Image: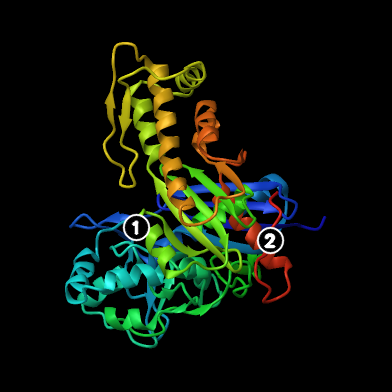
Amino acid sequence: MSPADGVVGIDLGTTSTKVLLRDVHGRRLSFVEGRTPWTTTPDGGTETTAEALTGFVVGLLRTALARAEATSGDVRVLGLGVAGLAESGVLLDGAGRAGTPVIAWFDRRGEEQVARVSRRHPGFPRIFVRRTGLPWDCQASVAKLMWFADQGLTTTAQHRWLSVPEYLVRFLGGDTVSEPSLASRTGLLDQAGGRPWQEGADTLGLAAGLLAEPRPSGVSAGRLRCGALPANVQGAVLTVAGHDHPVAAIGAGATGADELFNSTGTADVIARSLPGRLTDDQRERLVGHGISVGAHILPDTTLLLGGVRGGLLLRRVLGLLGATDGLARDRLDAAALDVGPLPAGLELSGAGPTGDDVVLRVRDDAGPPVVWAAATRYTAAETRKLLTTLHGVVRPHRRAVASGGWTRMASVRRAKAAAIDHLEFADIAEPGVAGAALVALRAASAPAGVPLAPPSPV
């Protein structure tokens, strides 16, 4: 019997990394997940190494391949796509060696360097926002690069900055490439033209040409050549699927222009696709309200990204109410559906973008179902505020898709449907890794060099 043809999706996440192997018809063959190997530095930072990451991912891949063959027989992998977190990356020297730690995107390193630039060039923060679509803070990759420079590392024209997904594709045997949705999170890209921002790099004291050759999501970045992996994956077409949020939108089925994806994990994220590019003024207005502007993985499409820590608040409220197991959550979920108008004096807060403390104010007539209903409505209302801000700058979306763990609760779905227009729910547990697999299938089956078109989710 000939082996089944399959594709692999990898989603390099902040907390965990996932590997999905499915056949070309969409049937799941195996799924593996492991905690991303971060370490804590003596001063409280969060980082890992390129070696630790690649070894960890190779181990997950080997496990996924072995499990698939144990249950489904021989499998031949045709394509492999890597999605994941954006601002963390690896700086390669002129010989292609990784010489820096991989700093977590949320690490505060770079904060001092950002403040110093603001003092020396008072007008630069506004220019940065208008050019890059990102806030001027320590999250963008340029802040990490400035921190490296202060540790004595001098970048040259031969150095290249690769995001973690881009680096993994290179490690597996692929080309050294820059995928636009990931590059747009670095602070090195001019969003007005989609080209490297030379003026910004000069002001920040960084070398020109740190971004590699652009290669869109869904386009081949070479073929897998990695001796640590078995023969049935050798030669698979590699592609950098892109930033995890737009890749998850594709996995959930939000594949068209003017569509909105709402991811409901610890963060309640909105990812909006918009054809074409925004103006500098539009980028400045959106960033000022907590919404970043970058490239989508779809061609000629802008990604508008914002979020609040709604899932974190919901988890904390569940703990407060003692609903820590599945049965208790189900009962609370069902009871909340019968709650009508909320009683006067019941107030909740704490779903801000930084994960603020939850503040709950109650009176005697607020039992657990009422408190839970208030929590679901409050988090949905916070998402609605983001959308109201968005609609003040760009036209409203025509379709919305929500996915993620919290949408399994009927009370959450009801609150979201009341807050987000034209909302549908996708019954898919892991849209990020599913989207990476879809992009891998596209890369393996499309003519060379043809960019991603909206795929049909399986």
Count residues near mark 2 (Cα–Cα under 10 Å), then give few for <14, some for 14-19, many for 20+.
Answer: many
Q: Is residue 362 above or below residue 84?
A: above
Direction bottom: furthest residue: 157
Disc 1 marks which amino acid?
Gly
Q: Is residue 340 above or below residue 280?
A: above
Q: Is residue 149 above or below residue 157?
A: above
Circles 1, 2 touching at the beta carbon (< 8 Å): no
CA distance separating discs 1 and 2: 38 Å
Q: Residue at x 51, y 26 (%)?
A: 411
Image x and y of residue 345, in percent = 30, 20
Direction front: furthest residue: 392
Count residues near mark 1 (Cα–Cα under 10 Å), then give few for <14, some for 14-19, many for 20+.
Answer: some
Q: Nearer the viewer, residue 435 or 350?
A: 350
Disc 2 marks which amino acid?
Leu
User: Based on the displayed image, in which of its 4 quarters is residue 206 positioned?
Assistant: bottom left
Q: Nearer the viewer, residue 448 or 277?
A: 277
Left or right, residue 163 beside residue 27: left
Would residue 241 be visible to someone looking at this image? no
Image x and y of residue 144, in percent = 30, 68
Q: Is residue 36 above or below residue 414?
A: below
Direction top: furthest residue: 364
Q: Residue at x 73, y 73 (%)?
A: 447
**Residue at the disc numbered 2:** 441
Looking at the image, tell me whether mark 1 or mark 2 is earlier in sequence order.
Answer: 1
Considering the numbered disc 2 on the image, is that residue within a helix, a strand or a loop?
helix
**Residue at the disc numbered 1:** 288
